[in-house]
Image (tube, rainbow, N blue to C red):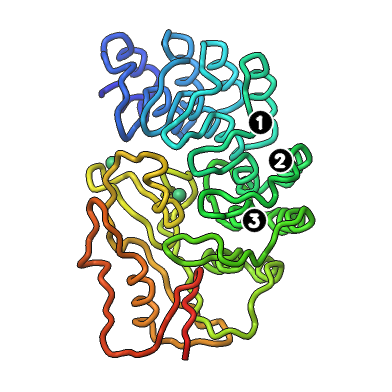
């Protein structure tokens, strides 16, 4: 463990002293990842030197992996530079390895730039790399690419496989839904989101998509996702916002700048779930329903973590937030480890109105 701590924050000189004397070089520390992965996440000036040193001195570095991050090359594709990825491949890294969610290194490269994706395809040509394999949540390369926020990468994918523009994941969420989620990490961008949405629509993406996209037992459309994330008006207006219905629009609050979902790797907003045992394993509102699909071993606490609030900006609005919570909570009871029924039990007292949770909103039948 001292070496792991050193790789996270100590100088290269200290690390050099510990390498070879500390026997945890190859150990997977559940929440930190393998040694090399710990160093990858450094943000200081020492990072490059530490990574180079580990690459040159740690014989098994190409084959190391952890439960949390997958293989070292998964992590390098997510946060390191192109040369580090090349170095790992030279040291025997498995370019087709899978992490706990069925994601391969090229999925992580899709969070970065077109150069990362092209490098992996070129380097992996002889090893049978496949860009278009789905992960366990049935997300394909296009679901990842649109969240990246770079139009050139989106076009790179869609020109090869245009039919992916309308393909849903395990919840029926098409790439348009994923283009509206704020990632906030891994050098992703958002300045080209409007152009990406227009490109998706030109390729046949449906902004209404009725009766699909159920998450948290709510029916979502792209409009509701955009509203949940508080996206600006120039994005909302591309999504055919409803004008006549009586809605209370749910918006999510940002958890904090540093948190992300340990399944989809996207920033945490709104409701989220925490592992009972290790507490730093978080799962977002979108991925919670997929925990069985990814065979998650973490026991997730169902607590009312994260915040949603009812927007007063919409034209309609019944502002009784207790009713909104009732609809939300009544849709959320579920058997499972660590379910906190006391936390999530609906308060159904004293109101005859029927309410239906619909996407980021509650639709109230008056
Ligand atoms: Zn997630
Ligand atoms: Zn855990």
Of pointers 2 and 3, the one earlier in the residue sequence: 2
Nearer the observer, 56 or 302: 302
Q: Quadrant of the N terminus?
A: top left
Secondary element under disc 1, as helix, strand or loop, is helix
Of pointers 1 and 2, the one earlier in the residue sequence: 1
Spatial separation of the CA atoms under disc 2 and disc 3: 15 Å
Q: Residue at x 56, y 43 (%)?
A: 139
- Against 310, is 204 above or below? above
Disc 2 versus disc 3: nearer the observer? 3
Mark 3 residue crowding within 10 angstroms, few (<14) / some (14–19) / many (20+): many
Residue 117 marker = 1
Q: Residue at x 50, y 83 (%)?
A: 312
Spatial separation of the CA atoms under disc 3 and disc 1: 21 Å
- Against 89, is 167 above or below? below
Mark 2 residue crowding within 10 angstroms, few (<14) / some (14–19) / many (20+): many
Q: Position of residue 306 (x, y in %)?
A: 36, 62
Q: Position of residue 150 (x, y in %)?
A: 69, 46
Nearer the observer, 197 or 55: 197
Secondary element under disc 2, as helix, strand or loop, is helix
Mark 1 residue crowding within 10 angstroms, few (<14) / some (14–19) / many (20+): many
Q: Are marks 1 and 2 in contact (CB under 8 Å)?
A: yes
Tell me the residue that label 2 is attached to: 153
Q: Position of residue 135 (x, y in %)?
A: 52, 38
Tell me the residue that label 3 is attached to: 176
Secondary element under disc 3, as helix, strand or loop, is helix
Horizontal side, residue 329 vs residue 183: left or right: left
Residue 62 marker = none
Q: Residue at x 56, y 82 (%)?
A: 314
- Against 251, is 64 above or below? above
């Amino acid at each position: 463990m001292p070496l792991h701590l050193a790789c996270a924050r100590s100088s290269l000189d200290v690390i050099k002293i510990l390498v070879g004397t500390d026997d945890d070089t190859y150990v997977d520390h559940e929440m930190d990842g393998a040694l090399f992965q710990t160093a990858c996440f450094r943000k200081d000036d020492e990072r490059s030197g530490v990574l180079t040193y580990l690459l040159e001195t740690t014989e098994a570095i190409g084959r190391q992996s952890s439960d949390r991050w997958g293989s070292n090359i998964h992590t390098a594709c997510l946060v390191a530079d192109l040369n580090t990825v090349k170095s790992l491949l030279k040291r025997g890294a498995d370019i087709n390895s899978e992490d706990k969610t069925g994601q391969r290194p090229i999925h992580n490269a899709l969070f970065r730039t077109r150069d990362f994706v092209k490098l992996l395809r070129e380097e992996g040509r002889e090893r049978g790399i496949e860009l278009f394999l789905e992960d366990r949540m049935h997300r394909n390369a296009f679901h990842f690419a649109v969240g990246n926020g770079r139009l050139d990468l989106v076009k790179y994918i869609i020109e090869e496989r245009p039919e992916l523009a309308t393909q849903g994941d395990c919840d029926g969420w098409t790439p348009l839904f994923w283009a509206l989620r704020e990632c906030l990490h891994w050098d992703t961008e958002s300045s080209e989101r409007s152009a990406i949405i227009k490109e998706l629509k030109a390729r046949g993406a449906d902004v209404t998509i009725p009766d699909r996209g159920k998450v948290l037992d709510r029916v979502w459309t792209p409009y509701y996702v955009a509203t949940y994330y508080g996206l600006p008006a120039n994005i909302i207006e591309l999504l055919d916002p409803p004008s006549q219905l009586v809605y209370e629009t749910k918006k999510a609050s940002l958890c904090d700048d540093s948190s992300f979902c340990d399944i989809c790797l996207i920033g945490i907003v709104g409701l989220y779930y925490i592992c009972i045992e290790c507490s730093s394993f978080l799962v977002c509102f979108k991925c919670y329903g997929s925990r069985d699909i990814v065979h998650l071993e973490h026991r997730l606490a169902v607590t009312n973590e994260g915040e949603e609030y009812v927007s007063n900006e919409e034209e309609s609005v019944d502002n009784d937030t207790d009713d909104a919570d009732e609809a939300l909570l009544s849709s959320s009871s579920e058997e499972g480890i660590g379910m906190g029924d006391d936390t999530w039990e609906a308060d159904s007292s004293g109101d005859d109105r029927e309410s239906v949770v619909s996407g980021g909103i509650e639709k109230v039948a008056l």
